[in-house]
Image (tube, rainbow, N blue to C red):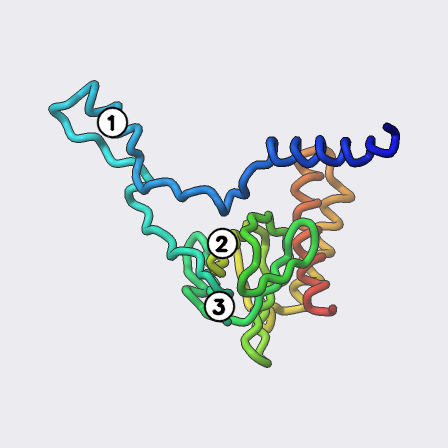
Amino acid sequence: MLRQAPRFLLRRASAAAMRWSRPFSTDLPAETAGDSKFVDAWKKLIPNIDPPKTPSAYMAPRPPTPSTIPSKLTVNLVLPYDSVLSAKEVDMVIVPAATGQMGVLPGHVATITELKPGILSVHEGNDITKYFLSGGFAFVHANSIADIIAIEATPVDRIDQNLVQKGLAEFQQKLNSASTDVEKAEAQIGIDVYSALNAALTG
């Protein structure tokens, strides 16, 4: 009987795995566009008035996820006051994620990551364009589109290293003379930004 025990346990484990296995999110059917539940509930309560549109009604649908990995990554770099890159097709970008530098290629898994002050590198063949970002978020979609939202984005070649070192010294002095937690926090943020700027220029 002991000889049959491993085979019996294996059959039980396989059956349990099949019973509790769940499909991947990519295997589930896509939800229908629009808020159908909201519209149905509205029509039951107020049938004589058309239901108001929800924010999703104003959003243009993303193109479907391609069956094959495209050769290019489409990048949008957006600031509160400007659109630096709009539907730019590139080979790769490297973003300053909060957990470290993160490379994004076509076909990258869908990801949302916070950005820390640092360098965004945009690779097009042999050409590399670098921007300094003060922070923000990166949204990488499954259809090889990357939306990068930042507060500030400045080409690295337009940054004056002397001004960076001067600003770093000023915030270090503010941190040394800070007397409240708010002053210390503000000074530390300035040091983090200027340190990242200085590393970008000297590294």
Q: Residue at x 41, y 43 (%)?
A: 29
Q: Residue at x 62, y 63 (%)?
A: 94
Q: Which of marks 2 and 3 is in front?
A: 3
The x, y position of residue 40, in whole percent, is 24, 27
The amino acid marked with disc number 3 is Pro
Q: Is residue 104 above or below residue 40?
A: below
The numbered mark, 2 or 3, whose residue comes first in the sequence reads 3
Q: According to the image, label 3 marks what residue?
A: 70
Q: Is residue 85 above or below residue 127?
A: above
The answer for how far apart the CA atoms under marks 2 and 3 are is: 13 Å
CB under 8 Å between discs 2 and 3: no
The x, y position of residue 193, in whole percent, is 66, 54
The answer for how far apart the CA atoms under marks 3 and 1 are is: 39 Å
Name the element at disc 3. Answer: loop
Q: Residues within 10 Å of mark 2 (few under 14, many from 20)?
A: some
Q: Quadrant of residue 31?
A: top left
The numbered mark, 2 or 1, whose residue comes first in the sequence reads 1
The x, y position of residue 132, in whole percent, is 59, 62
Q: Nearer the viewer, mark 2 or mark 1?
A: 1
The amino acid marked with disc number 1 is Asp
Q: According to the image, label 1 marks what residue?
A: 40
Is 163 placed left or right of 46 in the picture?
right
Q: According to the image, label 2 marks what residue?
A: 141
Q: Is residue 118 above or below residue 111?
A: below
